[in-house]
Structure formats: structure tokens, C-alpha cells
Amino acid sequence: MSISGLREVVGQTATVRGWVTHIRSSGKVAFVVARDGSGVLQCVIAKNAVSAECWETFARLTVEASISVTGEIRADVRAPGGVEMGVSDLRLIGESPLDYPIQPKEHGIDFLLDHRHLWLRSRKQVAIARIRHEIEQAIHDFFYERGFVRVDTPILTAAIGERSGLFATEYFDEGNAYLAQTGQLYGEAAAAALGKIYTFGPTFRAEKSKTRRHLTEFWMIEPEVAWNDSEANMVLQEEFVSYIVRRALDRAANELVELERDTGALERVKPPFPRINYTDAVKTLQAKGSTIQWGDDMGAEDETLLVADYDLPIFVFNYPKEAKAFYMKENPDDPRTVLCNDCLGPEGYGEIIGGSQREDDYDRLLSRIKEEGLPLDAYGWYLDLRKYGTFTHAGFGLGLERTVAWICGLPHLRETIAFPRMMNRLRP
Amino acid sequence: MSISGLREVVGQTATVRGWVTHIRSSGKVAFVVARDGSGVLQCVIAKNAVSAECWETFARLTVEASISVTGEIRADVRAPGGVEMGVSDLRLIGESPLDYPIQPKEHGIDFLLDHRHLWLRSRKQVAIARIRHEIEQAIHDFFYERGFVRVDTPILTAAIGERSGLFATEYFDEGNAYLAQTGQLYGEAAAAALGKIYTFGPTFRAEKSKTRRHLTEFWMIEPEVAWNDSEANMVLQEEFVSYIVRRALDRAANELVELERDTGALERVKPPFPRINYTDAVKTLQAKGSTIQWGDDMGAEDETLLVADYDLPIFVFNYPKEAKAFYMKENPDDPRTVLCNDCLGPEGYGEIIGGSQREDDYDRLLSRIKEEGLPLDAYGWYLDLRKYGTFTHAGFGLGLERTVAWICGLPHLRETIAFPRMMNRLRP
């Protein structure tokens, strides 16, 4: 049975299969710590309580050997999981040579990433994986409970103009296909069919960027809601982010402890989030010594400077048109700007969400496509959404790895996903 | 508010925003049927009960125009959703020109796929999308309830040998990256870390195949379970498939009615599923006139012939080694075969799952990799899983689109996903 379930069988005999993480012996009593993915268990072997064969098996154990261990489950408040096992039988299933690459010492990050398939077994990595999982399920539950329909938008897409950072692949007689950087445009079409939708899938950026906040392959969640305006869009975002954080606190508490995460910072995350107009943000940043000028997009340094005043995620809204994508709706109160927002995580985690109300006016959208020099024929179907029953709508994209990094308190995205893909990292 | 929620406000006044699907008028009374993605609503406009402006607005409505309509919600057992609206106000939000491409007549499939962004709005397509969504959430819930950890395996992968049907893309200085055909090998590494895992993501096959059962981009769910053998693997599969089907029956009943699905065939889907040894299956097929010989993989025609005797999904297990992948565990009772199974849907839907116990013996796996001529250096990390604490494990891959097609009763996969990708289909 699984280690996580042993609490329920205190006083009974159970068999657990897993991998050895620690071994020590004091001559007559031996200790084996085993993990099975669900938890960690200390197994106590008294020499006089087991067969000679069993005691000899102990002597052959090494770190990461796989074992089957049987014994009585005893409550022990000091133990992780609250129980330990008094061993009656121990079997070695799969040996693990002494050259197991990951040793209890400092390894360089490249070494660890080269051995990612084994590094995943370490306690910290298991905790991160379980938190990511909890966040992912929370995301699905949030939308499911609210009547959103999940829509899987395509990864392989036709030419959408000479945008930079695209991975290309030959697609039969159709020319090149490009790996999607977003599912949003498809999500908008689906919102006209289904009302409230969200996507949940991998997206790709072929950018020669080596920062701690970029992966070439990362997962995005992109809701799109018919009849939502920019303000309703921000309300949805703050409810969404708060829900995810609450869920991690409630159901991944042990894992957050394992990561030594300051959960106080997460406990504060509740709606409403502070809202700062872009124009005000620029003034604040300038007063703090930034060189940002009105019209510039905000860089990572500016974001860090700005969030330093807050202990919640914040919204910066209504950026200048030139700094943002063509599909964002012009702000009727200040046509130099668009109805959009970024959501910046606290503690310096930077942008975790970008969202906007979409341009729903056919003629304005057509002008923007032409201004950007995008190929009209590739956007004909997208314009159709404004031609046939146009509708106010808004949506956003949440970067999953950035969200996991923030909730886990990790400085770099590379540990937030099982097999990270970076500019110089395609294996294992 | 959403049409699906109107049942709760009978007798009250509500405002709904959506799109016009039908219009008719008898001079003094007009009817507008509107959809909003959550449901369909009949709105009744009595000329003498509304303003002249409102009545004139009705005259300007066309199919797929977007509207806002306000009125009293009345119970009406004949109406879809059980309610209709007595209109007090009607506003036209977005016009829809009379050239709306999808008309109430037969369109060719290429025309419909060219207009997929609009075709998605039709009742049948909305029903399919909602059933797919329900199935997806059921999949997540099934694994979540059972303590599996979701793991997102990479789409961009390094050379894994000259396998056919791979999409390739240039990856910085690393040479080509290939789009994943499966996440399984990564899932095995994760199972050694987390015990029970599953993947849920897009996979890719660059095959020049135009059958109704193939897409170039399709979604797969791949659980991998430490300590499961082939028999436990089949038990998990039948529980999983039955859970999904039950969930669709329970929570997407209206959508199945919309598709005129014979739900009796789905009601029967409960464990256990019949299990047929490959060798017996070949004899049965030969007796039915098939030309299959022992050693051949089973084609779609053979599958159809075989399932005709059953009204449940069936397992065909322990195929010949040559017909299956290198990583499957040799069957100790018949080394010509491997410990694997396919799960074939009833009603001629063919393979929806392929699964196997994995080869956990280092030397045997090494031999198989060499026999297949696969590049050893690319599989070093995969062999490590057998070197350091090897473990019995098994898993399977469920094809999402095939499962949706079967549950919806669709003959072709192309309608099971929002924007299908086929050999000659990369747009919209």
C-alpha cells in the first residue's frame, strides 16, 4: 500500500514498496528510510526480530535501491507522516549501484538538469511536482465549478505573420506550420460558441533568452469570456489566482513546508488586488529612479520596483497601445491606451498574467492588423468573429510555471516542470 | 445571466446576451431563439407588449446577430431548458450580414472545416465540445481521487532514433527537436519519483494518413504506475474507461440526446471487460475469414471484425514482440510475446487504449534497444531507470479524440476537437 495511507492502518501489518533514501545501523538496530512518491517512511529493523536473511538483505541496501518492506505500522509523532514501521520482512527488488549520480552534496545546476530523470526523485523536486499537480487540478476545478468549457486549441498553426520567436516545422504540402505561442485567437472563436471557455496547454517561444523567467516550452491557461469587459476580466483574475493559492495552502501544506515556503505571504492573497493605472505606475517608477518613459513596456526591473510597495499581486492596467498586441481594445477614455492589464506577483515574481478586453469593432481591428503589417488572409477568420455578431469579450493568459515558481518560492522556472526546455536544454 | 441558469428565476425578469439562431413572426407575435453557449432560449415578443423601437429591432435581426434580450422567465415544459422568455426589451448588439456562411442546408465537409471558427457555434458542435469538456474533467477527477500526480512531459524532445512520422523543428544549437509522439518514457521516470502519475497533453504524428481515425495532432492521457503489472494495468483501464463513460452519461445527458447517441450502448460499459489473448484472437479472426497471421499486428478491419461479437470494450492482450514497441516486457510464459494490451471500443470504434507492462530488466531492455537499432546515447537516461532501483511498472495511453468520438457516436475524429489538424488541414 502507499505510504500516505499508512496512518489509517496503525497497529496492523502492511507491505510497502519503494526506494531507499537513507540507511543507518547501530549494530543491532537498523533504519531504512524509504519513499514511494506518496510519502516517506522510516522502517526500523531489530536484528533479533527478523530472519538472518532479512538482516543480510539490509546490509546490501544502497541509496535508490527498490525494496519491498513488511511490518507493523506504529504511530510516531516525530516521524514524517506520523508513523514508522517495525520491520518483519525486507526484500531487495532492484539494486542501485554506488555510482548513483545524485549524492548528498552540492551539484551544479547543469549536472542536475543532465540527470533530471533521477533528480526528480529528490524530496524537494517531489514536493514541487505535487504542488504543481495541486495547482493544475485547482485550475480545472475553478473553471469547472463556474461553467467554463475547456477547449484544446491547436499547437500546429498556419502562418500568422512574420512574428519573431516561432518554432517552424514542415507540414506536408501546406508549407510551414508554427508552434502556437498562444491559443487566444482560437479561444475567442470558441467563446462565441460556448460563452465561457479556457485553454490549458503548452505554448512555445523560440527566443534566445537565458533568464530565470523564461522557458522555450511552457504551459498557459487562457480563459476567454463572452460579455466580460476589462474590469470583469480583472475580477475573474483575482478570484482565480486567490483560489489557486488557497488550494495550495489547503491541500499541499506539507509540500510547502518541505520547500520552507513563507506561507504568510500566500495567506494574504485575497481579492481585491490593488489596481494601478499604467500612467500612474510610470510616475511612481520615475519617482523611484527608473528611466521608464510613458509609452515603454515595463521590464522585469520596473516590475520588481513597482511591486516592492505591495504584499499582494497587483494589476497594472491600460498600457500604451504601442507596447501591447494588436487585438487589444482601444480605451475610449484615452485612445493612446488599450483596455488591458498585467498581473504582477508579489515578492518580485513579476508578471504571472497578461489580459485584455479584445477589440470587437471590425473596422478598428482591420486597421490594427494593417498597421502591424500582418497578413490579412491569415486573419480573415479572426475578423469574422467581429463580422458575424460581434461581442464584448475579454480574457487572459496565466503562465503556469511562473505561478508555480511564485507559490513554491523558487527563484528560477527550471524546477517548476518535470523536463524543462531552455535555449541550451533539450535533454533528457 | 446565462441561459442555463434561467430555470432558477422563473417568474422573474432576466437579461440574457447571446446570438440569434432562429427567427419567425406571425405579424403580432415574433419569436427569437437565442443561444449563449450554456443553452438555447426561445424569446417571445408580443407587438403590443413592447415599444415600437423594440419591435423594429426585431425586424433587423438576422441569424448570428448578437443581442441582449430582457423579459420575464416563464416555465414551459415544451421549451428546451424548460423555460421561455416573454420579452420586454430587445437590443441588437452586433449585426450579422446575410452572407453568414453556414446556412440550414447541407455543406460539404471541406467547406465546414474551412469555416470551423463559425461551425463551432452550431448545436451539434456545441454538444460535442461540452461532452469533450466533461470527459476531460472526468479524467482529471479520476486520477486526482486516486492519488495520481499529473506530470507534464515535454513536447520538444531530442533525437530518439530515426522513427518515422516525426515533426522536426530547428532548436538553437542543439540540432533538430522533434514533437513528442508520446510522453511515456518521461512518465516512467516520473513514476519512479512520484509512484502514480499521468500525463495529459498533445501528441503529434506526421503521417500521410487520411483515415477517419487519425489526426496529426491529438491529445493523449498516459498514466504510469509503479508496481502495477499487466493485469493490474488492465484493471485500471477498465475502471478508468467506465468512469469516463458514466460521467458523460450522468453530466452530459442533454448533449448526448442532442447527438441522438444510443446511450444504451454506453450504459453497458462496466468492468470487467472481456479479455482475449492475442493468439486466440487470431484464431477467431481466421475463422471469420480474416487473412491475419500469427505475428501480424491487428489492423482496423480485424479490430472491427473482432469486437462485433461484444457489446463492451474488450482487451486483446499479449501481442507478438515484433508487432509492438521495444519497451514492452517480455512475457515469461511465452517469450515470443510481450505483456501488453489494446483496448478496443465497441460499435466498431477500434483501439482507444494501448498499454503494457514495461521491460524492467536492464539487460533485456538494452538488447531490445540494440535490436531495434535505436541510438544508445539517446536512451541512456531511460536505461538509468532500470539501473538504479528498477521496478515493475505498467501504463497505457488513451487517445482522447477516439474516446470522444466513441462516446459521442461520431464516425470521424475531425469533429471531436475544436480545430482539427490533418494532413491537408492546418487552418483556420
Image (tube, coloured by chain):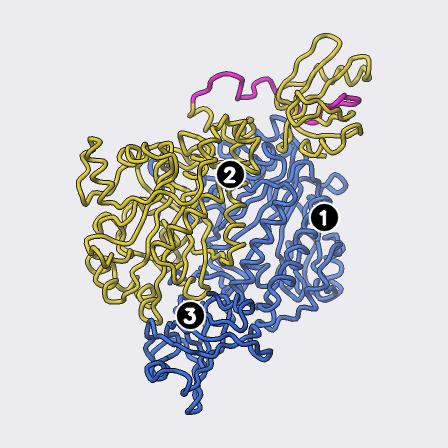
Chain colours: A yellow, B blue
The answer to whether B380 is drawn above or below residue B399 in the figure is above
Q: Do we see residue B204 in this rendering?
A: yes
Chain at numbered mark 2: A
Q: Residue B235 got which mark?
A: 1
The answer to whether A255 is drawn above or below residue B334 in the figure is above
Residue type indicated by callout 2? Arg
Residue at horizontal 70 percent and vertical 34 percent from the top: A5
Asked whether A86 falls inside the magenta stretch, the response is yes
Residue at horizontal 45 percent and vertical 49 percent from the top: A201
**Circle 2/circle 3 CB separation < 8 Å:** no
Disc 3, SS: strand
Return the residue nearer the eye: B42 or B297: B42
Q: Nearer the viewer, mark 3 or mark 1?
A: 3
For disc 2, the marked residue is A132
Residue type indicated by callout 1? Val
Chain at numbered mark 1: B
Residue at horizontal 56 percent and vertical 42 percent from the top: B150
> What are the residue bounds of the magenta stretch?
A85-108
Q: Quadrant of the N terminus of chain A?
A: top right
Asked whether B156 falls inside the magenta stretch, the response is no
Chain at numbered mark 3: B
For disc 3, the marked residue is B18
Q: Which quadrant of the figure has residue B31?
A: bottom left
First in sequence: mark 3 or mark 1?
Answer: 3
